[in-house]
Amino acid sequence: MASAFLSYLDSVRARDPAARSRAEILLYPGVLALGLHRVAHALYRARLFLLARFVNHLSRILTAIDIHPGARIGRNFFIDHGFTVIGETAEIGDDVTIYQCVTLGGTNPANGIGGKRHPTIGNGVIIGSGAQVIGPITVGERARIGANAVVLDDVPAGATMIGFKARSTLVPVETYMRAFMPYGTPCEAPCEPSSARLEALEQEVHALRDEIAALRRAGADQPRNGTGR
């Protein structure tokens, strides 16, 4: 138990360069929220729903993080900073990182049956700040959800999602193979598939401008027919 807890603190330290010691990590709101959620989830599974909600409410007051007691969370889960909402039927795998102001939200079934309403997040996923992942969708292992992306459909394993509504963007293999990507967003040179096409269009525009300028010069050099002779 102690070794697993120390391993968890070390996993947080590996993802947060601001952390200087294990003791400092104990003060992180995301770490406290996860610890209280483990208690609330145990109470929830024991069908002590009111007590589970009380622990959940206490956690929200202390950390500004709202994790429903019913949510299932794997090992080494880290919420960096906070202000996150995780719904009742959300399932989160191992080694998942979520940044501030993220929502793992649910749908409202028309038939009134609760069922599976919230996302399933695979192992090693990183979700950037402000992202909204909504509905009973699956985010594949090692996927990256960029900051402020709105994800409404299943995400393939290893994909990087950006924008509203989120779309997949290609990333270089050396970026994909990285163990960790802060905020789930590649910050190096352009990674969007449209960038190459945009560059080609700019070159075509420059070529057309050159042709137009050449035609104008040719027209100006031709002798004019008139009565001035």
Image (spheres, grey):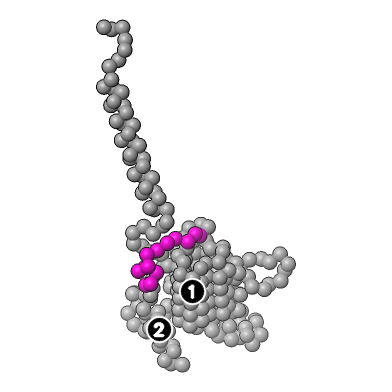
Query: Which quadrant of the view contains residue 136?
Result: bottom right
Image height of 11 relative to 207, above or below: below
Dot 2 amino acid type: Leu
| Image position, residue 2 (x, y; %) | 43, 92
- The local secondary structure at tag 2 comes to helix
- The local secondary structure at tag 1 comes to loop
Q: Is residue 44 left or right of residue 94?
A: right
Residue depicted at 60% across the width and 67% down the height: 135
- Residue highlighted by disc 2: 9
- Can residue 125 be seen at all in this image of the molecule? no
- Can residue 91 be seen at all in this image of the molecule? yes
Dot 1 amino acid type: Glu
Q: Nearer the viewer, residue 143 or 109?
A: 143
Task: Tell me, for residue 141, which label it has, or none.
Answer: 1
Mark 1 is surrounded, within 10 Å at the Cα level, by few (under 14), some (14 to 19) or many (20 or more) other residues, namely: many
Q: Is residue 211 left or right of residue 193?
A: left
Image height of 41 relative to 85, above or below: below
| Image position, residue 219 (x, y; %) | 31, 23
Q: Nearer the viewer, residue 9 or 188?
A: 188
Residue depicted at 31% across the width and 12% down the height: 225
Let me know if residue 154 is in the magenta part. no
Looking at the rendered image, the disc whose residue lies closer to the viewer, 2 or 1, is 1
Query: Which quadrant of the view contains residue 223?
Result: top left
Question: Considering the image in quadrants, where does the C terminus appear?
Answer: top left
Q: Which residues are magenta?
A: 166-178
| Image position, residue 87 (x, y; %) | 58, 72
